[in-house]
Image (cartoon, helix red, strand yellow):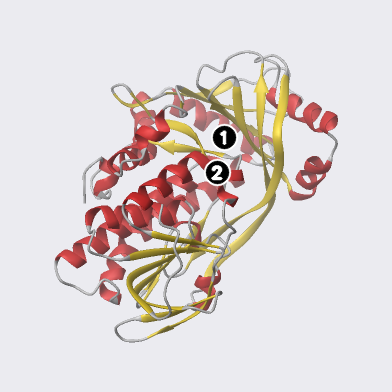
């Protein structure tokens, strides 16, 4: 893999800040379709930090098709766990029985699970390997200190003192994006007063590829199947409670976890670290400026209630790559505002829609108000008894149609 330092004043086509899955997928998507474009990725995290990420993510079928088209899926599929079934319950922690209000079968198409669980480090590693094959430079431990936009290029100042001249700067530096602030892009933001606890558990009996989401008064509690008899937990609590729980000793934490997880899979044991992070809704008011574009969490941070954060990021990567590649083929300036606004128009509605949907779901389900509970349970029951409506929800999550970027439909750009 190319991990080389740039020369002072080097001229390239595209500089991407952030080597998470969105930054890497954007780079690989563009480079594969337009090898003539010189692309470089800089990432502020030290070398090898990504290999220590113990989290896992749900990858919808559309993103799987994209990864397959990018030449990464074959490397991931052996360790990926298909989600064969999803159930949704609505209950209190103390309820002895949790009635199932909604079940989803697990196919987006014949023989195609609607999602897979993949370890983040495996996903990152596969994308990095592909980036290396395509000659993309990845420079670790170097952040962006600032940039000056000119008419034809942007000069980007890096933390190691070097300056890079690029036609387009893409910010994939997370929900607290420094580059977004540097570009003067404002955000709409509110805090939910909740935190998400993430950990991995080992259990005695097999999960058979079943994912579960329990709507509890403090927030959703999701168990997502991993390879082997293991599950990834995404557990929403009020922030003060979440901080207390992650700091408790192992015995008390596992007792609290067991109350929510149940004993249907036998004894459970927490593996590896447990972490909590604050939850909120963050939407950038603009996705682009001249020679500048936001993608992934830098453009939008949403509640994990629907597990769509990663898939939104892949949609951004696919749409931005397609916009840039088509503009370059037409001989247009890939950093021009009118070109980048095509990407913004393409992604804005879907992003706002998903942000509002997750916000409404969280407000509707993260409470214990009797009348609200009755209405939402009725709603879940109605959806469960209408196969056409359930198919629509699965298609939305896994098989975007029509205006979806080509990569997500399994087609080359």
Left or right relative to 9: residue 413: left
The residue lying furthest to the left in this view is 330
User: Observer-nearest residue: 411 or 32?
Assistant: 32
The answer to whether residue 353 shows anywhere in this view is no
- x and y, in percent, of residue 251 in the image: 84, 28
Q: Secondary structure at mark 1?
A: helix
Residue 108 position by quadrant: top left
Q: Position of residue 56 (x, y in %)?
A: 55, 38
In the picture shown, does residue 33 fall above or below 230?
below
- For disc 2, the marked residue is 361
The residue that appears at 33% across and 28% down in the rendered structure is: 388
Task: Tell me which corner region of the image, top left, top right, bottom left or bottom right, holds residue 167.
Answer: bottom left
Residue depth check, mark 2 versus mark 1: number of the one nearer the observer: 2
Query: What is the crowding at mark 2: few (fewer than 14 residues within 10 Å), some, or many (at least 20)?
Result: some
Q: Label 1 belongs to which residue? A: 375
| Structural crowding at the residue carrying mark 1, measured as other residues with C-alpha within 10 Å and reported as few (<14), some (14–19) or many (≥20) | few
Front position in the image: 277 or 190: 277
Side (left or right) of 272 relative to 327: right
Reading the chain from its start, which is encountered first: label 2 or label 1? 2
Q: Secondary structure at mark 2?
A: helix
How far is mark 2 from mark 1, CA to CA?
Answer: 13 Å
Residue 345 appearing in the image: yes
Q: Position of residue 375 (x, y in %)?
A: 57, 34
């Amino acid at each position: 893999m190319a991990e080389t330092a740039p020369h002072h004043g080097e001229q390239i086509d595209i500089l991407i800040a952030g080597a998470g899955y969105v930054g890497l997928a954007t780079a690989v998507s563009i480079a594969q379709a337009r090898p003539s474009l010189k692309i470089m990725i800089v990432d502020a995290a030290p070398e090898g930090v990504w290999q220590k990420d113990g989290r896992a993510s749900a990858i919808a079928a559309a993103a799987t098709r994209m990864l397959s088209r990018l030449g990464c899926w074959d490397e991931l599929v052996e360790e990926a766990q298909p989600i064969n079934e999803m159930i949704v319950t609505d209950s209190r922690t103390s309820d002895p029985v949790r009635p199932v209000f909604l079940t989803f079968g697990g196919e987006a198409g014949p023989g195609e699970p609607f999602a897979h669980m993949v370890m983040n480090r495996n996903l990152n590693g596969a994308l990095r390997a592909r980036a290396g094959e395509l000659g993309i430079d990845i420079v670790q431990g170097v952040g962006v200190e600032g940039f000056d936009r000119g008419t034809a290029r942007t000069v980007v100042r890096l933390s190691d003192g070097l300056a890079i001249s690029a036609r387009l700067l893409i910010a994939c530096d997370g929900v607290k994006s420094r580059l977004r602030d540097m570009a003067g892009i404002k955000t709409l933001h509110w805090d939910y007063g909740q935190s998400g606890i993430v950990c991995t558990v080992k259990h005695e009996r097999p999960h058979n590829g079943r994912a579960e989401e329990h709507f509890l008064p403090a927030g959703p509690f999701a168990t997502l199947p991993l390879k082997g008899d293991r599950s990834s937990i995404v557990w929403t609590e009020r922030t003060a409670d979440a901080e207390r729980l992650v700091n408790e000793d192992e015995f008390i934490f596992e007792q609290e976890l067991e109350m929510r997880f149940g004993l249907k899979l036998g004894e459970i044991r927490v593996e590896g670290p447990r972490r909590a992070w604050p939850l909120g809704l963050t939407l950038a008011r603009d996705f682009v400026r001249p020679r500048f574009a936001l993608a992934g969490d830098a453009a939008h941070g949403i509640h994990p209630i629907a597990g769509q954060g990663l898939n939104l990021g892949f949609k951004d990567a696919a749409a931005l790559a397609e916009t840039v590649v088509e503009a370059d083929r037409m001989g247009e300036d890939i950093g021009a505002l009118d070109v980048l606004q095509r990407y913004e128009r393409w992604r804005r509605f879907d992003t706002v829609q998903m942000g509002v949907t997750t916000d409404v779901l969280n407000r509707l389900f993260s409470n214990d108000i009797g009348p609200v509970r009755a209405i939402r349970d009725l709603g879940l029951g109605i959806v469960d008894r209408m196969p056409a409506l359930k198919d629509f929800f699965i298609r939305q999550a896994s098989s975007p149609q029509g205006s979806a970027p080509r990569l997500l439909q399994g087609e080359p750009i």
